[in-house]
Image: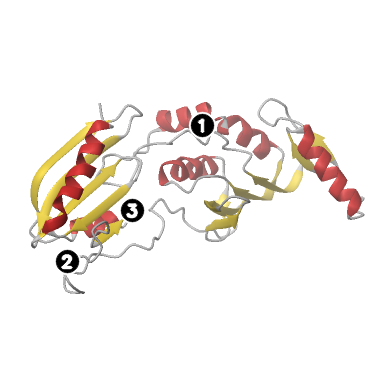
Amino acid sequence: MGLDRSAASIAVAQRKAEELGLRNLRFLCLDIEAESLVHVFDMIVTTHALLQAEQDLGIPSRSWRTFDRADDPSQQAAFEQRTGLAARLDRLCGVLRADGCMIVTEKTRQLARRVPFQRALAGRGLRLVERPAPLRYRTVEEIVDDGPFYVLHQGDRTTLDWDESPEQDEGTPFDFHAGPVISADLDTPLYENHWPSAQAAWEGLHDRVIIREVTRQASDGRQVHAERGRSQGLQYLYCANTFDQRQLVIVDETRSAMLDTYYQEILRELP
C-alpha cells in the first residue's frame, strides 16, 4: 500500500505501477497527521513524511561547550507537538504489528533534530536493528546530505544502542609543524574547520590568549559564543552555538584583520 497526502504524487505512483505491470499495489491519498488507518502492517517504510518542519532547529544542547541534551520530557513533547511528529508517528506505530519493522529516513542530519527524533522513536518502543547510516544523493540542483537511514523493529530481538554524539566528520586538528606559517593566498586561512571537530581542534590550541570574546542569546533561541585570540604566534577565531554549529579559522599575524572582520559580522547578527 502506498500512502501520500498529495493527490498528484498518488497519480504519478499509480501511473508508474501500471507501466511496470504491478497489480498487487494499492494507493491511498491520506494525511496521516489528520486521518487514521484501519489496516495492520508487517513493515512500514516512511521517507520525509514524519518530520516535515524543516525550519524547526530542534532542541539545543546544554551550552555552547557541549553537544549533549538534557533529558527533559516537556522539551521533547513540545518538539514533537510543534513539528507534528507525535501525531504522525503515533498513528503509524498504531498500525504496525507488535513484532513489525519500520524503515525511516528524515531530514535530521543536524544533531539538534536527530536527537529528539531518535528519542521519539525509542519512546514508542522502536529499536535499532542496524547502525544508522547518513544518506547522500543527487537532486537536480545539488548533492543532498540527509539524515540517517534507520532500520527499526518492535519486539525483544537483540538491538543496538542509540547514538547521540555528533556525526563523524572530515575535520582534523591544526598542525603547527606541518608547513609554513605564512599563507600564499591572501584570502585563504591557514586552517578552516566548519565541522563538529572544530571544537576539539580549538581545545587543542596551546597557550591560547583571548583577545576578545562574547557569549549571547540569539533571537532564535541559540546561545552563541565567539572568541578572537592568538596561539603560538598565530591568530584564530572560534565560534560555537547550542545548535551544534562549530567554526575555527586560523591565520598568520599579517591576516589578523580578516578575523576582526569576521568577528564584527558575528556581533552584528546578535541582539
Evaluate if marks 2 and 3 touch, with contact meaning CB atoms under 8 Å apart.
no
Q: Which mark is residue 196?
A: none
For marks 1 and 3, give the CA distance. Answer: 29 Å
| Residue bearing mark 3 | 194
Horizontally, is 169 left or right of 93 in the view? left
Q: For this rendering, which residue is in front, 4 or 183?
A: 183
SS under mark 2: loop
Question: Which quarter of the figure is the C terminus placed in?
Answer: top left
**Residue at mark 2:** 182
In percent of the image, x 61 and y 48: which residue is there? 104
Residue 101: x and y, percent?
67, 51
Mark 3 burial class by Cα count in 10 Å: few <14, some 14-19, many 20+: some
Residue 212 at x, y = what percent?
10, 42
Say whether disc 1 or disc 2 marks the residue closer to the N-terminus: 1
Q: Which mark is residue 80?
A: 1
Image quarter for residue 173?
bottom left
